[in-house]
Amino acid sequence: MAIEIKVPAPGESVSEVTIANWLVKEGDWVEMDAPLAEFESDKATFEVNAEKAGVVEKLIGNIGDTIAINTVVAVINTDAARPAAAEVPKAAAATADVSSKAVSPSAQPAAKPAVEKEAVPAVNSTDTDWSLVSPVAAQLLQQYNITPSQVKGTGAGGRVTKVDALEAIVAMGGVKAQTAGGSRAERREKMSNLRKTVSRRLVAVKNETAMLTTFNEVNMKPIMDLRAQYKKKFEETHGVGLGFMSFFTRACCIALTEWKAVNASIDGDEIIYHDYCDVSIAVSAPKGLVVPVIRSAEKLSLDEIEKEVKRLATKARDNKLSLDEMTGGTFTITNGGVFGSMMSTPIINAPQSGILGMHNIVERAVVENGQIVIRPMMYLALSYDHRIIDGRESVSFLVRVKQLLENPEMMFDGKKPQERVLGL
């Protein structure tokens, strides 16, 4: 019997997806629940699995094609006899080419692995195994003079995917291999659904909100001294590092409860005020910027915030964030300082009304008590929707955040910071 495999809806608002990768090819034997393909929606990447074991009779569509939800993408013959080579289910998946269109079954028979290798030529090494590298990933690795042995594959059977290749390129500095005489080549690449959605939303925010940005600066010495003194003990006690994000999240939550308009949003002709702080944290992922949400952040301790930041950042890096984890925030924090940004005007993450931008920490000369001293300073930027937030609220909110960061003990109910941070 032949069964059809359709693309399920990854979320209520998703109507179409893009074929990101084929994980099998026509003629392959697949076990039940084995991944057949990777699909990309405007918010997340997910796999479609085989509903029953059998032979893949047909794969429908090319990598990069955009298709509607519930579209048939594969046909599996469940009456086919299991081949002897399929006794170890993942063996076939490990050597499968990701595109049925790039390597057709007739031209590249499974019984000849040497031919499969030739479909993805090596660049510098003749003994490097390229059979576990997808064609798209192979093209990227060749451009940056990287061999498969330098990349950790996360696909089935250790297969190197496009995402793995991109992560390796970033980790190794992103310097392309030089060609004699240079190159003036160009290439076109179709926008991903995620990038198209980000572009559409950013333009909509600029056009539909009255966005302004107010600035301030904060002396980071008190927090830096606190981290230097207790960072090791904090990690030993809680099993997670003590970063800046937990302090900023804590300070913002306190300020948001005091200046509720910054934590509100507009819905038609109504203003929605939130009695909780679902803080979105901007994270740079391999496929673009994503903004996962820390739920009820106002109730979390520093170590709980750090653990949640680590969990969400790891899932973002692995493209495993769910739709629920990326929706519903009430306020956003973004840290351009990790890339060296000195100053910026972050764009509001709609339908939210405010976003705080962190920046690079730079030692600067400042005046304290009539004396010129050197302090590690950071510029803060608060972009806000002037339709709902007035100057008084925006400036007062940012001043309050500055006050809390420069006096960390104020964030912990009057206790000394180390008592709350370390749970003493």
Image (cartoon, helix red, strand yellow):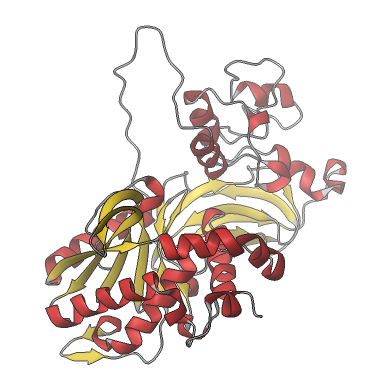
| Viewer-nearest residue: 115 or 139 | 139
Q: Quadrant of the C terminus?
A: bottom right
Answer with left or right where residue 348 lies relative to residue 44: left
Relative to 294, is 271 above or below? Answer: below
Q: Quadrant of the N terminus?
A: bottom right
Q: Quadrant of residue 394?
A: bottom left
| Viewer-nearest residue: 361 or 197 | 361
- At 62% from the left and 34% from the top, the residue drawn is 133
Percent x, y of residue 123: 57, 17
| Viewer-nearest residue: 238 or 362 | 362
Residue 71 visible, this orientation: no
Residue 252 visible, this orientation: yes
| Viewer-nearest residue: 263 or 15 | 263
* Most distant residue in the front direction: 370
Percent x, y of residue 94: 72, 41
- At 32% from the left and 34% from the top, the residue drawn is 188
Relative to 173, is 348 above or below? Answer: below
Q: Quadrant of residue 233?
A: bottom right
Relative to 421, is 181 above or below? Answer: above
- At 53% from the left and 29% from the top, the residue drawn is 141
* Most distant residue in the top direction: 181
Relative to 188, is 382 above or below? Answer: below
- At 62% from the left and 39% from the top, the residue drawn is 160
Q: How many marks?
A: 0
Q: Quadrant of residue 333?
A: bottom left
Percent x, y of residue 372: 26, 53
